[in-house]
Amino acid sequence: MTNLHSSSPAGEVLRAASAASSTVSSLAGSASPRHSGERFAVQAEPPVLRRHPHLVRYAHVEAEFDILIDKAIAAIADGEPAEDEILGHYVAVASLVRAVSFREGKLLEQAVERLAKVNPDLVVLMQSIKLPLVKAAIEAVAGNDWRQLEGVRLDCEAPAKGSYTPDLIVVNRAKRAAFVLDLKRSLASYGDTSRLEELKLKMLASAMVLPDWLYKTQKRTMVETVGVAIIDGASRPSDHAAGVWALSEIDDLLEIDGAAACMAELRVRFGRRVQQLLEVEARRALGITETPAATLPLCAAGSATSLHQRRFGTLRAIPRVKICDDVTDDTKHHGAGCRCGSCEEPSFDDADDGRDDPEALADDVVFWPPEHIRVGFARRLLDA
């Protein structure tokens, strides 16, 4: 992957940002609240400071992310925990916590896959793919520094010792680069164990056969650079040299400005819903009278056969949006959060994402094998 630099010198960038700030300040007093907010949004990110050609905002994906959150919450609330002599009447709380740990990881995967659609050069593979752990690849990674393996490409059909299932494989067709991603809600539990090193070994070994696997199974998809990255959902300090990325740096992997902010907002909203479920269950475990302040997703309340869902039957859903009473005056601003026709901004059109037809790509003339394959930990904007 290649760094995208503006041709303007640093001084011109700063002057452009300063000029934008001065212009907004002079107009803020006379502009309407709505127009003022739009100008301040421009001030926050002048086009000259954009790092990537593609841009996404949470409003573009809010509806789809809300559906993903609802499904995750419904899955967490579903099911009846088994009795546990140690946990006693706190077993339901522990069951929810365990379910959250699993469902948050799946939620992050689905959200990244959705955001990747903003960049038409990206293809995301995530359907329980099993990459073979070829014996030669495992021995090469275990016995050598991965920097010494540059240019080595192995046959994916060679004898293997099991397989590795990545959370996501992101292919940048324009740069012929691929990333093997493993998303973790938090790496805190990996700090003092060997599990993280074992995970890196499997990822690097699978990356050595990925170019051959993509070519043979994904309609002759060719890549010349493969990077592996473990994404820490808690966004603790990253270590790119060791293949660890913070979720707040996802912009650079997807080459989409605003992707990290969307993921952060997703986690905030998901966290609120999870905490509401936990509070209700904790009150029940302590014998405290429930309060109807928590929110239950509508999709979880539809089934009357689940004991666990009936346990949350007293909860009510809080409306997410408001509609103005007076929608006849197009010139009137109805306040923040209004979703009426005159206030709501145009929605993101996912149908026109500019992706190439995969079938058409199969007809392109390709030359296999490539002259050079580079495998290693993902660095900031890998050189293609």
Image: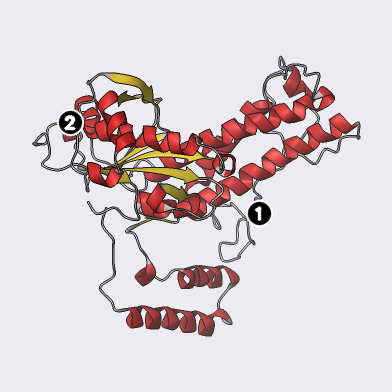
Which quadrant of the structure image shows residue 319? top right
Residue in the picture at 60% in, 61% down = 329
Is 56 in front, or is 168? 168
Task: Answer with mark 2 or mark 1, whichever residue precedes in sequence.
Answer: 2
Report the residue marked by disc 1: 324
What element does badge 1 sit on? loop
Q: Is residue 278 visible?
A: yes
The tally of labels here is 2
Give amino acid for label 2: Arg
Quarter location, residue 86: top right
- Per the model, the C-alpha gap separating discs 2 and 1 is 53 Å
Q: Position of residue 121 (x, y in %)?
A: 27, 46
Q: Which residue, as the protein is rendered here, is positioned at the far top?
A: 305
Where is residue 371 drawn, in percent x and y? 10, 42
Q: Quadrant of residue 201?
A: top left
Residue 370 x/y as whole percent: 12, 39
Callout 2–callout 1 Cβ contact below 8 Å: no
**Camera-nearest residue between 77 and 152:** 152
Which numbered marker is on residue 374? Answer: none
Taking the spot 85% from the left edge, 38% from the top edge, the residue there is 291
Q: Is residue 305 left or right of residue 240?
A: right
Q: Is residue 104 left or right of residue 319?
A: left
**361 horizontally vs 79: left or right:** left
**How crowded is the residue under tag 1: few (<14 C-alpha within 10 Å), some, or many (20+)?**
some
Q: Where residue 10 appears, x then y in whole percent?
A: 34, 79
Q: How is the image coloured?
A: secondary structure
Q: Secondary structure at mark 2?
A: loop
Question: In the displayed image of the protein, which residue is found farthest to the front?
Answer: 143
Which numbered mark, 2 or 1, is in the foreground of this view? 2
Question: What is the number of the mark on residue 220?
Answer: 2
- The amino acid marked with disc number 1 is Cys
